[in-house]
Image: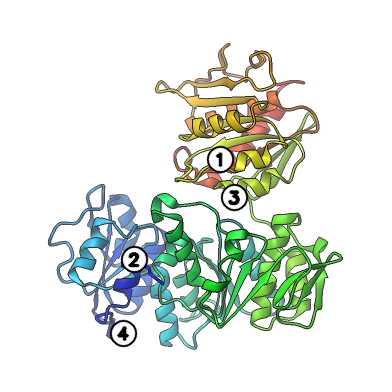
Amino acid sequence: MGCGIGGTVSTNPASPTFDQFANLSVLVAGAGVSGIATVRALLSLGADVTIADSREKALEPAVELGARGLLLDPDNSPTSETLDGYQLVVTSPGWKPDSPLLVLAHERGLPVWGDVDFAWRLDQSGILGPPRTWLAITGTNGKTTTTTMLHSVLRAAGLSSAACGNIGLPILDALFTGASEGSGARVDVLAVELSSFQLHWAPSLRPEAGVILNIAEDHLDWHGSMQAYVDAKLQVLTGKVGVLGLDDPVAASLVSRSQAERTVGFRLDSPAENEIGIVDGTVIDRAFGDADGIMPAADIQPNGRPGVLDGLAAAALARAIGVSADAIAEGLRTHETGPHRNAFVAEVRGVRYVDDSKATNPHAAHASLTTYPRVVWVAGGQLKGASVEELVPAVREQLVGAVVIGVDRRQIGDTIARHAPDVPVVEVIAGDDGTVTATLIHNGRRNSALPAHVPPGADSTGGHTPGGNSADDVMRLAVYSAAQLAEPGDTVVLAPSAASLDMFRDYGHRGRSFASAVSALAQLGAHP
């Protein structure tokens, strides 16, 4: 499978073996969470480590650990001497293959490993003890929930496991757990959430079992094409067992492209041979058992269509390594949902407010919006090259209003106007002077402008002069505007369909901002 620069240089014959790492000169590209974990691991192996980033402050934690810091230009461009003396580059997953530093490394013939590829190679080397069992989870949506579900199941089975990777805990940190005195109990099974970026840079990865939950347009600005995005996802189907979500048309079409020794699937309907599915409300295993009943589907937490699908995927991965049906049932029944994933916030004057800030693309937003019969949709942010042209027609029967925010708000608002012309759309923006305003940009079924009710601190036109974070002020006015569009019995859903970094620190900040705005709304009078 073609992996671009990542695949080419990672298999370079000059790649070092782990008995050569003492005093090996290694450059780590990127000083984020995975970069710092990479520095820790390399230093423990005795390597001579330099970390490169364009953010001077981001270099400080690595320098405190004992690495040298290399401050790059804002576009991460190197000079012709930047790579002199280095024998290996380990890149953080967010760095694109066409990043100038990585292109220069390729031209110099230097091996470039992703941090996941480094972790895999290190684990397989045996330096840290017997290799762990890797269970890999990817997909456009549902990765984190499936990973935490699988971790819950593994714990119920009495296995020493860690949920790691894109979920937050770096894989390298999980590998070093138990590797030294006082570092905790050794982890034997890894439930690894992997993004398409991480998989692009991990051509060596061969997990015991891996799943592709679903695939929809996402991160096309990074990968360059849908084909390249799919190719990256396919890297999880290279081990002993590959699992595919058969209710997703793109994932289901990849059966013939799986390189796993065995490929199975899961679906919400009755399973065929080599599938896990549901019959009369019971999860049935026809992939690893003889139509064994595992548990009532209604007991899976979280419930609802997205949650049940994620639970089936977690069950398939667990069954692939011989986990019992009882442990799967216990793990899925007791699983606790993480924040900002279709989470109920409050009910205010008969209107429910739901935070699904984790819905960072149209596919995830569809799963969220179709859960409720009547929705006021709070959307917007960075679409990252994705389109909402298919999403809006699919959810227009649920939509009673929409509030759009963020850099791509007009693209979403105009799409709603084309495909759901009866739906009123409010745009909330922060001006250059810090004033936040709400404007009805599409009347829809409304025959007048928004009611002249304004939140505390707003002027008579709906403008709001922020006293703190402008993103939080935008969210406050967005929630207020959504409340004006909603009626008792409706649900206001934050399902942005877009990334958050144009306004917020991350999707968690966006979700907390939404919850705070709902709390402020509840403190107003009888009507917003």
Distance, label 3 to label 2, CA atoms, is 26 Å
- Tell me residue 525's x, y (percent): 74, 20
* Dot 3 crowding, Cα within 10 Å, few <14, some 14–19, many 20+: many
Q: Quadrant of the N terminus?
A: bottom left
Choose the circle earlier in sequence order: 4 or 3: 4
User: 363 above or below 8?
Assistant: above
Choose the circle earlier in sequence order: 3 or 2: 2
Residue topped by disc 1: 389
Q: What element does badge 4 sit on?
A: loop
Tag nearer the camera, 1 or 2 = 1
Distance, label 4 to label 1, CA atoms, is 49 Å
Q: What element does badge 2 sit on?
A: helix
In the image: residue 76, left or right of residue 172: left
In the image: residue 107, left or right of residue 456: left
Tag nearer the camera, 4 or 3 = 3
Identity, as a three-letter code, of the amino acid under mark 2: Gly
Residue topped by disc 3: 363
Identity, as a three-letter code, of the amino acid under mark 4: Thr
Residue topped by disc 4: 17
Question: CB under 8 Å between callouts 4 and 1?
Answer: no
- Tell me residue 176's x, y (percent): 46, 76
